[in-house]
Image (cartoon, grey):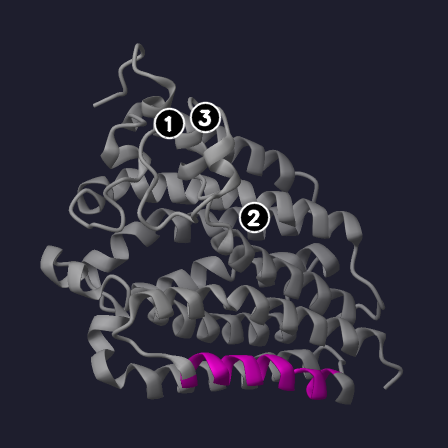
Amino acid sequence: MSPDPQAPEANLAGPRPADAVRASWVDEAPANIQPYLRLMRLDRPIGAWLLYWPCVFGLLLGAAAHGDTMPDLLYLILTGIGAVVMRGAGCTYNDIVDRDYDARVARTRNRPIPSGAVTVKQAWAFALMLSLVGFLVLLSFNPFAIFVGAASLFLVACYPFMKRITWWPQAWLGLTFNWGVPFGFAAATGTLTVPAYLFYAGCFSWTLGYDTIYAHQDKEDDILIGVKSSAIRLGQRSKPWIYAFYAAALVLMLAGGLAAGLGLVFALAMLAPAAHLYWQVHALDIDRPLLCLKLFKANRDTGALIAAALLAGMMAPF
């Protein structure tokens, strides 16, 4: 059901989703564009950060492997733009596919499509527009990086269906959300080598951890509507498994950085994200949804700490 064109401006904006950030700048935007900003999740920027950080890691790692002391600033800006628009396109596509499920979950039933603020046809048009912007950004990179970036579309297209067929949609998200590592490395070097694969595997394990934390918010609703997640599969065993996921992430990232020529300073600097990840799991109570959301969002800072460790290693004389 599309919104009534004669309705008051507040109604055109549609209701705020239950999982939206309170007092977001999106609430102050013109009412007719608010639903589209919410489709892009601009009221919840954590997803854009988690998509952007792997791009930064790949660019830094590639620059280190290439013998540079700084990454290309233009590429950092372009991948930031790409992360925002492609996350918006992916979320819009995901909402189209999941609209019937979202309508049955308290946290998501007020999202633009199930609430009727945006029609499915309008959502498809918006997703295509965002994808075109992302494609134009992609054309700024070398041909091999363009190929690597385009290859991620298969992962994006399949992701919304994973929770219907596997207990581990978080694993598919790990493959998808961290594609920025090989893309950034390819952008910086024109190739893919061992450091990129190791760091990508580390980021995959990182995502398994933080998205399992996130999934504990929805486990009761997910069980009722019949979708799957690692949170449901692991249940009360989640904390030791998340410790293991995070430990594997750190080991693989460390190996990737060392393989790229980073040394002792990088290794020591990685103690900061290690401590931050330990704090997350130590503080976790899987039966407190708001705490799960807070700890999930804390991974924006984890990404910053990992990027800082890579940069410190690049700038260090040894």
Residue position for label 3: 33
Q: Which of the two discs, 1 and 3, labels the residue nearer the N terminus?
A: 1
Q: Is residue 314 left or right of residue 303?
A: right
Q: Quadrant of the C terminus?
A: bottom right
Q: Which of the two discs, 1 and 2, labels the residue nearer the N terminus?
A: 1
Contact flag, marks 1 and 2 (Cβ < 8 Å): no
**Residue density around tag 1, few if under 14, some if 14–19, many if 20 or more, within 10 Å:** many
Q: Which mark is residue 83?
A: 2
Q: Residue visible at 29% across and 76% down?
A: 286
Nearest-to-viewer mark from 1 and 2: 1
Image position of 149 with respect to 121: above or below: below
Q: Nearer the viewer, residue 198 or 306?
A: 306
Q: Which mark is residue 13?
A: 1
Residue 301: image location, x then y, percent: 58, 68
Residue 213 visible? yes
Q: Which of the two discs, 3 and 2, labels the residue nearer the N terminus?
A: 3
Q: Quadrant of the N terminus?
A: top left
Q: Is residue 264 magenta?
A: no
Q: Is residue 272 magenta?
A: yes
As shown in the figure, which amino acid type bears the numbered disc 3? Ile
Residue 196: image location, x then y, percent: 62, 70
Residue 99: image location, x then y, percent: 23, 40
Q: Residue visible at 40% across and 49% down?
A: 156
Callout 1: helix, strand or loop? helix
Q: Nearer the viewer, residue 97 or 198?
A: 97
Q: Residue visible at 44% across and 63% down?
A: 175
Q: Main secondary structure of the magenta part?
A: helix
Residue 245: which quarter of the image? bottom left
Look at the image and give the residue range highlighted in magenta.
266-282
